[in-house]
Image (cartoon, grey):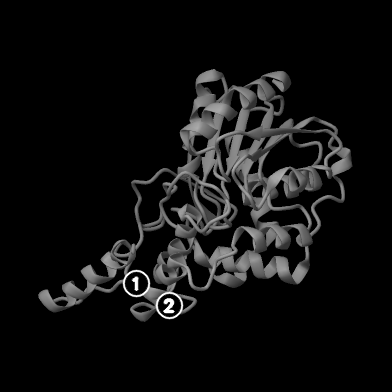
Amino acid sequence: MKKAKFILPVLICFLGWFSCKKEISIAQEGNLVPKTVEDDKTLPAISLNGTLLHAESFGSPDSAMVVVLHGGPGSDYRYLLNCKEFANQGYYLVFYDQRGSGLSKRHSKSSYSIQVMLDDLAAVISHYRKSTSQKVFLLGHSWGAMLATAYINKFPAAIDGAILAEPGGFIWEDIEDYVSRSRDIKITSETMSDLLYPDQFITGREDEHAILDYKYSLLGSFDDSKDSPIGNEGPLPFWRAGAIVNQALFEIGDKEKPNWTTHLQQFTTRVLFVYSERNRAYGLAHAQKVSSAYPHAELFKVYGAGHDMLSFPTGWNNFFPVGLNYLNSLK
C-alpha cells in the first residue's frame, strides 16, 4: 500500500501540533502545497488580465513563438518542460501556469469561465510577442489542446499552426465520453483506497485552497497507477494541482455544453494531432473522431507511450523529431 506516502505531510503536521508550542496549520500557505507567485516573489511571474501568472520563456524572443498549454484543468507546465528542447532549434518557447493552476494566483470559483481562460491566453501571447510578423504556434496537451482549439475556433486567423496531444474532445459529449473511460476506477482497487484514506484526516471548504489542492493531487496519482487505462510510465512531476479551477471549469462545461468546432473549417493550416499507443481510453478511433473537426489534421501515433507522451523519455524521443519537422514546415 502507498498510504504512507500520501499521509506523510499530514502526520508531520500532527506531530508539529504536539511537539511545538505554536500550532502549525495545514491550510497555511507553503505548509501543505507550494506557495504561489502571490506569496513567493522569487518565482518568475507576469501580471496581466487581472491576475498573476507563473511563467517563463526560453530562446530568442524574436524567433517564431511556441506557447505551451498544460493539461488539467488545474495542472501546471512542469511536466511539459521537455518542450524547452524546441528553443535549441530556433524557437521561442513560452510556458505559463494557467489561472488558478500550478504556481499561478488562485481565484474564487465563481470568477472562472472559458472566456477568461481564452482572454488570459490572448494576453500571454500579446505580452511575449515582439512584432505582428512573428509567427505564433500553440502546443497543447490534453485540456491544453482543448483550450488551444477553443482559441483557434474563436480566432482562426491569429495562429500559424498547432500541435494537439490527446485532447479529450472539442464538443462536450466527446469530452464526457473520454473522461468516463480514462477515469474508470474500480471501487475495490488499491488506488481508490489510497484516494479515500486521507479524507479521514483532512477535509476542506471551498475557500481552503491548499487543502483542496493537496487532495486533488492525490486523485492525480491514479494516472500513474496500474489501474489506470491511460498508460503512463510513472508519476508526473508537478508543483501544485488547482482543485478549484478544475471543478469550476468542469461544472461550466456540464452547464454550457461547449462546442469549439463551429469555426474550425476556417483554419485551413495543417495541424499535428498526436495520440499515444498505450492509452487504452483514447485510441485511433477517438483520435480520428476528434481531429476530424479540423479540415487538415495529420495524425501521429507515439509508440511506447501513454497519455503523457511528452513527459517520459520514450514518448518524447519518438515525438520530438515529428513535432520539430511540423514546426519547421510552417516556420
Residue contact between numbered discs 1 and 2, judged by CB atoms under 8 Å: yes
**Left or right of 206 in this view: 124:** right
Left-right relation of 277 to 225: right
Residue tagged 1: 27
> Local crowd at mark 1 within 10 Å, few (<14), some, or many (≥20)?
some
> Where does the image place residue 34, in percent across and percent down from the top left?
35, 57
- The quarter of the image holding the C terminus is top right
Res. 64 in view:
no
In-front residue for pair 254/5: 5
Give percent across and percent down for residue 289: 81, 47
| Residue 86 makes an appearance in the image | yes
- Percent position (x, y) of residue 70? 56, 46
Location of residue 304 (image quadrant): top right
Task: Provide the secondary structure element on which disc 2 rests.
Answer: loop
User: Mark 2 packing: few (<14 Cα in 10 Å), some, or many (20+)?
Assistant: some
Residue at the spot 66% in from the left edge and 20% down from the top edge: 325
Question: Tag 2: residue type?
Answer: Gly
In the rendering, which numbered label is found on residue 223? none
Q: Which label sits in the foreground, 1 or 2?
A: 2
Residue extending farthest to the front is 188
Q: Give the quadrant of the N terminus.
A: bottom left
Nearest to N terminus: mark 1 or mark 2: 1
Image height of 223 relative to 64, above or below: below
- SS state under label 1: loop
Q: Hey, which quadrant is residue 182 in on the image? A: bottom right
Report the residue at 33% width, 66% height from top: 3
Q: How many numbered marks does the figure carry? A: 2
Report the residue marked by disc 2: 204
Q: Tell me the residue at 61%/47% (across/down).
A: 279
Label 1, label 2: how far apart the Cα atoms are: 9 Å
Question: Which amino acid, by three-letter code, is at mark 1?
Answer: Ala
